[in-house]
Image: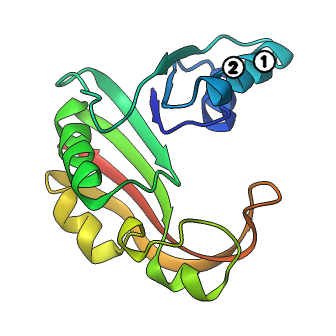
Amino acid sequence: MLCLAEGEGRSAVYLATLCHDKTAVDQSEVGLAKARRLADAHGVDIATMTADLGGYNIAAGAWAGIIATFAHLSPEVRRRIHRSVVAGLQPGGVFILEAYTPAQLAFGTGGPKAPERLMTLASLREELSGLEFQIARELERDVTEGTGHTGRGAVVQILGRRL
């Protein structure tokens, strides 16, 4: 399982507790050091890689699963990474994404302030062409992701499978 823009490692560590092989990629070595400490505290192993997603290449057909939670990239980097995600999945592989939508700006409970870094279901359907969407929705939900990201949030959620 590949975890993109993994930050402090909560997703990767959770997956490790379920016995999934996992690789956490993030541009912050500080965040990944926290991820390794979190993994140690839970008695699991995770692989980490420090990389800027702007130049990161996902090997074609290499992954059974890829996750991107709150990975708010510039539009050009996001489109390139999403094409790479689709190509990087094995047949039957899944991609899980959750991100803030432009409606999040009205909540002020976290996420980027730059509207172009926020995602819509319509843009994701286009960017992730090649996936069969099993979940594809925009909704409001309570988000509890630390002091900077807590409260009501407007999110888009995707579960897509490569055919």
Q: Is residue 85 above or below residue 109?
A: above
Q: Is residue 109 above or below residue 159?
A: below
How many angstroms separate mark 1 from mark 2 (CA)? 6 Å
Q: Position of residue 87 (x, y in %)?
A: 16, 35
Label 1: how many Cα within 10 Å (few below 14, some 14–19, many 20+): some
Residue designated by label 1:
37
Q: Position of residue 158 (x, y in %)?
A: 40, 60
Kindly tell me whether residue 55 is visible in this rendering: yes
Specify the color scheme: rainbow
Residue designated by label 2:
33
Specify the amino acid type for callout 2.
Answer: Ala
Q: Position of residue 143 (x, y in %)?
A: 72, 66
Q: Is residue 141 above or below residue 103?
A: above
Tell me whether circle 1 and circle 2 mark residues in contact (CB < 8 Å).
Answer: yes
- The N terminus: image quadrant: top left
- The C terminus: image quadrant: top left
